[in-house]
Image: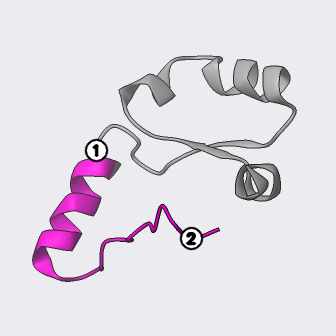
Amino acid sequence: MADIADSGITMTGGSALLPGLDQMLRDATGVPVHIAERPDVCAVLGLGAMLDGTVQPMVLNPLAG
């Protein structure tokens, strides 16, 4: 939650392209809302980069506190 409060929300996927959705989320949450560059394909591009070895996947530790 602290990361969202600090950095805001980054919208990805085709829904990010819906007109006014970012402003609605900004108004509803009070935090900054950003739309990813090429939100319609950014998840696929990220997966491709992981498969190519260009970036490493982030590993979350559910036990870290």
- Placement of 53 over or under 46, stated as above or below: below
The image shows residue 31 at horizontal and vertical percentages of: 82, 40
Instruction: Say the numbered circle drawn on residue 41.
Output: 1
For residue 48, side relative to residue 28 (left or right): left
* Residue sitting at x 81%, y 50%: 5
- Percent coordinates x, y for residue 11 in the rendering: 54, 39
Q: CA distance from mark 1 to mark 2?
A: 31 Å
Q: Secondary structure at mark 2?
A: loop
Looking at the rendering, the stretch of residues picked out in magenta corresponds to: 43-65
Q: Earlier in the sequence, mark 1 or mark 2?
A: 1
Q: Amino acid at mark 2?
A: Ala
Answer few, some or many: residues within 10 Å of disc 1's Cα (few below 14, many 20 plus, some between 14 and 19). few
Residue sitting at x 78%, y 43%:
32
64 drawn magenta: yes
Q: Residue 63: horizontal and vertical position, in percent?
A: 51, 66
Residue at the spot x=16%, y=64% of the render?
A: 48
Residue bearing the label numbered 2: 64
Q: Nearer the viewer, residue 4 or 42?
A: 4
Tell me if 47 is positioned left or right of 60 in this view: left
Q: Secondary structure at mark 1?
A: loop
Q: Is residue 46 above or below residue 9?
A: below
The residue most toward the right is 30
Where is 10 relative to 24, above or below? below
Q: Nearer the viewer, mark 1 or mark 2?
A: 2
Q: Residue at x 51, y 18 (%)?
A: 18
